[in-house]
Amino acid sequence: VAGASEAAAGSEAQVGSLLRAALSHIGAGGLETAAGLLAQAAVLRPDDGYVANDLGAVLQQLGRLDQAVPHLLRAVSSVPAYTTAMNNLAVTLRDLGNLADSEKWLRTAASIDAQNYRAWQLRTLGDQGGPKSGPAGAANNGSRPAAAAAAAVAAAPASSSALYNLANLLRDSGRVGMAAEALREAAGVPTLDCGG
């Protein structure tokens, strides 16, 4: 048992070293070397969606779109709510001309981003309006700061790179009205009812 845990620790150290080196090469523009290092890390961690996403993203940047797709699919299947991987997959599929699947992944990522944002709002409001807050209008009991925080959180848009990518995809496919709606949603701008 001790030998197995030592081997696992050594493997984790090796993966960490590979990932640090890959990041360094990416920063220096050495995408080919980074892809090789990430491929080695992916062999050591075949079920790690984050490593699969990083490898897929680097392959996409290198223009190896067909090679990138399986890694990005592994990333989204390993980490189902990983919107960054969904975005990377959608952009790769778009670049391959598969607009329908690209749109599907962007819509899924935008939906998850919106759900995550709403959950963040609830956590933030819960933290601000805890037991100290008391009834509205009570003097110095924390309710005014909680109300101000609630207003600020409610006013902030649920920005999502998936929505921006979706808007670009819709625009490029001639669906300009739908693209404008996606951008309005990304910016937190309400839709106006003009009566027509």
Image (spheres, helix red, strand yellow):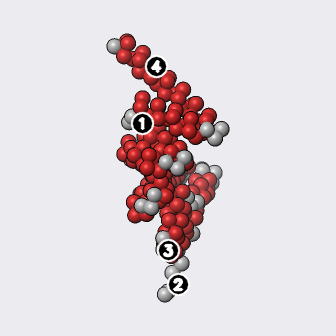
Three-letter code, disc 2 = Cys
Camera-side mark, 1 or 2: 1
Dot 1 or dot 3: first in sequence order is 1
- Residue 48 position in % (x across, y down): 42, 36
Q: Is residue 181 above or below residue 109?
A: below
Spatial CA distance of label 4 from label 1 is 17 Å
- Residue that label 2 marks: 194
Q: Secondary structure at mark 4?
A: helix
The structure residue drawn at horizontal position 53% and vertical position 44%, both measured from the top left corner, is 58
Residue beneath label 1, please?
48
Coordinates of residue 182 in the picture (x, y in percent): 51, 67
Quadrant for the N terminus, please. top left
Give the number of the mark in front: 1 or 3: 3
Q: Please, what secondary structure does the residue beneath circle 2 have?
A: loop
Sequence order check, earlier mark of 1 and 2: 1
- Rounded to the nearest whole Å, what is the CA distance between mark 2 and mark 4? 64 Å
* Residue for badge 3: 174
Left or right, 141 with reference to 49 = right
Q: Amino acid at mark 3?
A: Gly
Q: Earlier in the sequence, mark 4 or mark 3?
A: 4
